[in-house]
């Protein structure tokens, strides 16, 4: 019989593993009844032995069953907001005010820390004895909502380090960490794609998506959203570990405890340096992984900060410089329905070009017919358009006060504007779909999907060229690409590019028709040996994104076997549920699709198995993963090892070559030590991954 204490530990570990498998990996480990039994046993042990109770026990998960409201929690110290400035003059005024309040001479320069203003939502995380006990939204600044259960899931998908279950290193008795919950742009897009594929509504921008994901009443939903947490503030009751002299030291401490802090934070001596930093962040922000809507300027010296204090809602030691909004007014010159690769019709507004978020914008999406009606956008209307991050610009609303009466309504087409086939809108669908089997727009869209960088990677084949190849009848299916002769490519590249000519642009050498045609043939030759994963993704099989393509390629290294696999065999593949299996099978069974694949192979396209490194540190090795990794999910870790020729096993034995021990590693780590198996921690593991690329 294990001691009650050991049993408690074991139960917690098993329940956590089961939670992760169920909610994050979608691969249940335990039957419901068994899970409930473990939970009850744990609750009983904790009730009988109060000393074993712990705020991070699975039994303590507030909101473990969804309620209809969040509990309110008071912040020990108010969560203030920031005063806004938008010009250099106002920044100078802030600096002058700071110096005046401190009685400093105009010559003294104040040290500031400049941070990007992250466009997510502020939360507070409370750590007691180094353990995450609860967390809340900002709310009205005094009282927030308890979203502890939701916060616990952040980072489990590996988007970033997330909300740490426990702090690394020495921790004070109590620590309050503040920061922003957000969705990185790439994760936002992937998540929106998934939502759309599942028939749900996409979010308008990463901020809304982050807020909507965090404020779910059911934490199981939050667990599926790849949220990130970035820390920017730490406080707590007096303790030597919190005796920082500067804000910068605080940021360093946050990073040492294991949190992500923004890589863009900088120390600046004086306002001139702050402004230079503002310029750097403002122009670089479109390349940051997440959206920022300004900068935050904070007095670095904490002693000065205390002396400055706060007004009723905003501190006197910090200010936000907000970027001008990424919203512009312009006029709609035309509305049309664009047809995508799946036949979906999307209303698009052509607008008079305006500068928005660092780029010229000439068209904006109206999403779907219902949105178009709801917003009542007419041809000729003045509208507001918005660009959020990398997302396609969208029409926010019409400005009816600027109507002249000459505006006209757009009639949604009753037939496909490209091929004339009839369009259908199935029940529960938001979009109309073209039913044409040989629709040129669909084919052009598929061709673009096929050749994109993440798929077959045919450099130089953009939207316009794809449309032209289809319109001229040069490409009827993918394989035709390899049959287009040099002279035809040359002719295609000789057509004057209208916009370029209008803008007075000169052709660069790569754009000379002959050179461009040569480059295209070379790109096509290179594209003949994709990995099987890329080829499967490129084919545009319904429900098969990059990740699923990877799993399919791993399970069926032989393409023909995959084409012949029945639904049952497909369901045996990780990440493939009954619905995906059904849709994949439907696709592989269709003779037209099989013919497309056969023609590709006949054209010389030879998919290769994933590259496996035969010499790296993982080649031929058996690895066991245990404990939780903060930087990447267990699935990703497994995939990385397998890609390097290693095997991941579930239990430690004499045959194990290496154990990767994350946080809270338990029995397996102990066994590895007993058997003398090599053990690395997360940092060591990451270093090996880098080595063995
Ligand atoms: S410091 C009193 N730092 O801005 C100090 N806030 O208007 C306020 N925010 O609710 C927090 N990035 O959501 C701070 N680097 C950053 C920030 C930041 C974004 C948000 C935060 C806060 C709001 C204040």
Image (tube, rainbow, N blue to C red):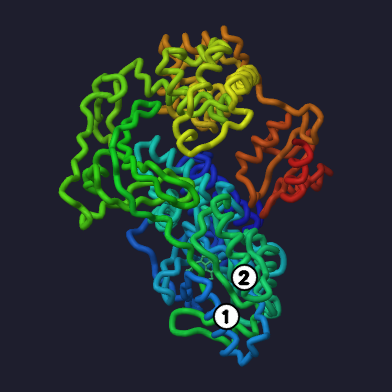
Tag 1 or tag 2, which sits nearer the N-term?
A: 1
What percent of the width, then of the height, locates residue 221?
43, 49
Query: What's the residue at 29%, 34% (across, down)?
Result: 336
Query: What's the residue at 49%, 16% (across, down)?
Result: 478
What percent of the width, then of the height, locates residue 82?
48, 74
* Mark 2 in CB contact with mark 1 (< 8 angstroms): yes
Query: What's the residue at 52%, 80% (across, down)?
Result: 93
Query: What's the residue at 74%, 50% (across, down)?
Result: 683
Q: Extreme top residue here?
A: 602
Picture layout, residue 579 above or below residue 593: below
- Can I make out residue 530 in this image? no
- Quadrant the C terminus occupies: top right
Observer-nearest of 433 and 209: 433
User: Toward which corner of the image does residue 72 lie, by quadrant?
Assistant: bottom left
Q: Circle 2 is placed at which residue position? A: 274
- Can I make out residue 403 in this image? yes
Observer-nearest of 530 and 93: 93
Q: Circle 1 is placed at which residue position? A: 95
Please state if 287 lies on the left or on the right of 578 as rendered.
right
What percent of the width, then of the height, locates residue 382?
27, 51
* Tag 1 secondary structure: helix
What percent of the width, then of the height, locates residue 7?
62, 54
Observer-nearest of 408 and 448: 408
Observer-nearest of 338 and 77: 338
Q: Extreme right residue here?
A: 676
- The label shown at residue 336 is none
């Amino acid at each position: 019989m294990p001691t009650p204490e050991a049993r408690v530990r074991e139960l917690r570990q098993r329940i956590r593993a089961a939670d992760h498998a169920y909610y994050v990996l979608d691969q249940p480990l335990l039957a419901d009844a068994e899970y409930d039994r473990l939970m009850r046993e744990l609750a009983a042990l904790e009730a009988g032995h109060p000393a074993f109770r712990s705020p991070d026990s699975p039994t303590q998960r507030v909101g473990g069953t969804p309620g209809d409201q969040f509990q309110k929690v008071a912040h020990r110290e108010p969560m203030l907001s920031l005063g806004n400035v938008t010009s250099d003059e106002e920044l100078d005024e802030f600096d002058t005010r700071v110096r005046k309040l401190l009685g400093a001479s105009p010559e003294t320069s104040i040290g500031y820390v400049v941070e990007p203003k992250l466009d997510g939502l502020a939360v507070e995380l409370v750590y007691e004895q180094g353990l995450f006990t609860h967390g809340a939204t900002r709310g009205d600044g005094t009282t927030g909502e308890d979203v502890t259960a939701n916060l616990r899931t952040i980072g489990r998908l590996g988007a970033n380090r997330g909300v740490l279950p426990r702090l690394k290193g020495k921790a004070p008795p109590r620590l309050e960490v503040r920061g922003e919950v957000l969705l990185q742009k790439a994760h936002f897009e992937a998540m929106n794609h998934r939502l759309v594929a599942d028939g749900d509504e996409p979010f308008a921008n990463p901020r809304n998506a982050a807020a909507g994901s965090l404020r779910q009443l059911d934490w199981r939903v939050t667990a599926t959203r790849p949220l990130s947490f970035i820390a920017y503030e730490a406080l707590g009751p007096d303790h030597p570990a919190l005796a920082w002299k500067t804000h910068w030291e605080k940021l360093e401490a946050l990073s040492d405890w294991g949190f992500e802090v923004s890589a863009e934070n900088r120390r600046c001596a004086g306002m001139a340096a702050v402004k230079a930093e503002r310029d750097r962040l403002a122009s670089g922000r479109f390349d940051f992984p997440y959206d920022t809507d300004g900068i935050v300027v904070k007095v670095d010296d904490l002693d000065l900060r205390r002396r400055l204090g706060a007004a009723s809602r905003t501190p006197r030691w910090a200010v936000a410089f907000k970027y001008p909004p990424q919203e512009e007014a312009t006029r709609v010159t035309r509305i049309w329905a664009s047809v995508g690769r799946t036949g979906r019709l999307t209303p698009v507004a052509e607008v008079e070009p305006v500068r928005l978020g660092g780029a010229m914008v000439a068209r904006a999406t109206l999403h779907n017919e219902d949105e178009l009606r709801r917003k009542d956008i007419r041809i000729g209307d003045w509208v507001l358009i918005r660009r959020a991050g990398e997302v396609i610009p969208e029409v926010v609303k019409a400005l009816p006060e600027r109507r002249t009466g000459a505006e006209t309504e757009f009639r949604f087409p009753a037939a496909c504007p490209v091929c004339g086939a009839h369009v259908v809108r199935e029940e529960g669908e938001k979009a109309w779909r073209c039913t044409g089997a040989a629709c040129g727009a669909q084919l052009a869209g598929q061709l673009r999907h096929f050749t994109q960088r993440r798929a077959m990677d045919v450099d130089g084949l953009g939207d316009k060229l794809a449309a032209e190849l289809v319109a001229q009848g040069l490409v009827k299916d993918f394989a035709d690409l390899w049959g287009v002769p040099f002279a035809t490519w040359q002719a295609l590249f000789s057509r004057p590019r209208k916009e370029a000519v209008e803008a007075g642009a000169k052709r660069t050498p790569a754009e000379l028709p002959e050179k461009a045609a040569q480059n295209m043939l070379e790109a096509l030759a290179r594209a003949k040996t994709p990995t099987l994963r890329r080829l499967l993704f490129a084919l545009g099989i319904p429900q098969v994104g990059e990740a699923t393509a990877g799993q399919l390629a791993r399970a069926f290294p032989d393409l023909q076997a995959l084409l012949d696999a029945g639904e049952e065999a497909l369901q045996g593949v990780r990440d493939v549920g009954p619905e995906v299996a059904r849709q994949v099978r439907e696709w592989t069974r269709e003779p037209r699709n099989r013919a497309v694949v056969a023609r590709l192979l006949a054209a010389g396209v030879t998919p290769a198995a994933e590259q496996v490194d035969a010499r790296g540190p993982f080649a031929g090795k058996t690895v066991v993963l245990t404990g939780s990794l903060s930087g990447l999910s267990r699935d990703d870790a497994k995939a990385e090892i397998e890609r390097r020729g290693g095997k991941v096993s579930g239990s430690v034995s004499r045959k194990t070559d290496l154990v990767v021990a994350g946080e809270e590693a338990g029995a397996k780590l102990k066994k590895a030590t007993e058997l003398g198996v090599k053990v690395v921690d997360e940092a060591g593991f990451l270093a090996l991954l880098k080595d063995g690329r």
